[in-house]
Image (tube, rainbow, N blue to C red):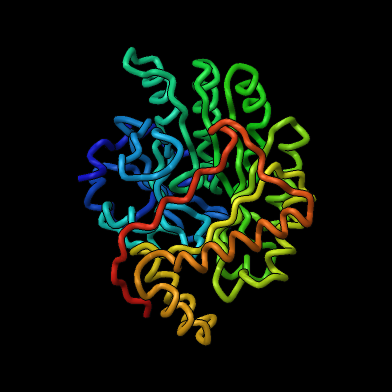
């Protein structure tokens, strides 16, 4: 069981505004504390509070990303992005990759103390740690649980380099801590903004701050002295891959003061594939044949399509004076994983 490193926390009463939740617990978390909150932002959501046994995770060797270690204080995500590649991880908990991923969030309530303990271990050698690479550590739940401040404080106190990739504007709450950490170690901050069309945002990323609010946060972080990269992801075939959409997005990213922009075409892994396909058939049925063609061989769009997108984004970046900087790994966005060998999957 991939969640055997989790256990339930002691019940220390309910946080303000909370009420005991009644849905059955996931089979993999038989002793978790389930909570619901009487606030509109958490309507229909359940939070499973657990005591994790470890928190700094080794990235599998097969992954081609420029970091080896991650911290994920949450599982599941209230952002509810239709395409989220992490959806299938919820099936390890006997939950589904669709609505459960959006509405049933696991919270590692002891994340801060665990980070401090693991950084102090003699075997730890101060490697770079990436956050926000699975689900967003600044999703809405972070406003209530406040797991990130003690994590950043621990990383600051041990002068351990780290990076954060997010769609959340709540990161601005922790700006003083990020600045303190940047005085003693390398701190990278990146934002995910795939497009600036607000109608599309409401349809496909309903739980996230709007693209404009995210770009306002890019500006605030830039003004605070950080070189913020923007991951232009995902670019959605037929929805945000037109020249006009790409140009508008890159122009907005440049105007926000971002240091770089890195495009990434939509990829549809199992779990995300089925959920996105269901949404696409309901909202944009005329695009279904195109997606069947693009993703007939597996989770990734054809290399030719990806190269074309990259070229068009680079042209737009040059047009708007935005050039990718050459910095250390802590300043770079996570590099997309290389497409695996072709896997035959169905779309609808």
The residue lying at 35 percent from left, 38 percent from top is: 59
| Quadrant in the picture for the C terminus | bottom left
Q: Residue furthest left?
A: 1
Give the mark count.
0
* Rendered position, 95 above or below 277: above
22 lies left or right of 237: left
The residue lying at 48 percent from left, 36 percent from top is: 130
**Viewer-proximal residue, 5 or 311?**
311
**Viewer-proximal residue, 315 or 293?**
315
* Rendered position, 322 above or below 339: above
| Quadrant in the picture for the N terminus | top left
State the image coordinates of residue 258 (x, y, percent, origin top left): 71, 44
308 lies left or right of 51: right
* Rendered position, 157 above or below 335: above
Q: Residue furthest top?
A: 122
State the image coordinates of residue 152 (x, y, percent, origin top left): 54, 27
The residue lying at 61 percent from left, 37 percent from top is: 189
102 lies left or right of 247: left
**Viewer-proximal residue, 164 or 24?**
164
**Viewer-proximal residue, 319 or 246?**
319
State the image coordinates of residue 287 (x, y, percent, origin top left): 52, 82
The residue lying at 51 percent from left, 42 percent from top is: 137
State the image coordinates of residue 244 (x, y, percent, origin top left): 72, 70
């Amino acid at each position: 069981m991939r969640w055997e490193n989790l256990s339930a926390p002691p019940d220390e009463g309910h946080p303000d505004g909370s009420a005991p939740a009644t849905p059955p617990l996931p089979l993999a978390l038989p002793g978790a504390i389930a909570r619901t909150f009487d606030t509109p932002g958490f309507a229909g959501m359940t939070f499973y509070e657990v005591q994790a046994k470890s928190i700094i995770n080794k990235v599998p060797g097969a992954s081609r990303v420029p970091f080896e270690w991650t911290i994920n204080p949450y599982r599941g995500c209230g952002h509810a992005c239709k395409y989220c590649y992490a959806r299938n991880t919820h099936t390890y908990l006997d939950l589904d990759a669709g609505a459960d991923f959006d509405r049933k969030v696991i919270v590692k309530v002891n994340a801060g103390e665990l980070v401090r303990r693991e950084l102090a271990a003699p075997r730890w050698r101060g490697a770079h740690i990436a956050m926000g690479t699975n689900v967003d550590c600044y999703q809405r739940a972070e406003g209530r649980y406040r797991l990130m401040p003690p994590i950043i404080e621990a990383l600051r106190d041990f002068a351990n380099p780290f990076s954060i990739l997010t769609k959340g504007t709540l990161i601005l709450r922790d700006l003083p801590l990020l600045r303190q950490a940047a005085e003693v170690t390398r701190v990278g901050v990146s934002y995910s903004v795939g497009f600036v069309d607000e109608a599309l945002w409401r349809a496909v990323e309903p739980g996230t701050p709007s693209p404009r609010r995210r770009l306002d946060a890019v500006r605030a972080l830039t003004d605070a002295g950080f070189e913020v990269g923007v991951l232009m992801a995902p670019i959605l075939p037929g929805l945000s891959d037109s020249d006009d959409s790409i140009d508008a997005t890159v122009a907005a990213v440049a105007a926000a003061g971002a240091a770089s922009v890195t495009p990434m075409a939509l990829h549809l892994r199992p779990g995300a594939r089925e959920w996105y396909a269901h949404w696409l058939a309901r909202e944009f049925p005329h695009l279904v044949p195109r997606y069947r063609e693009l993703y007939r061989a597996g989770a990734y769009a054809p290399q030719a399509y990806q190269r074309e997108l990259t070229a068009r984004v680079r042209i737009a970046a040059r047009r708007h004076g935005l050039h990718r900087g050459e910095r250390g790994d802590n300043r770079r966005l996570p590099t997309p994983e290389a497409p695996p060998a072709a896997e035959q999957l169905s779309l609808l």
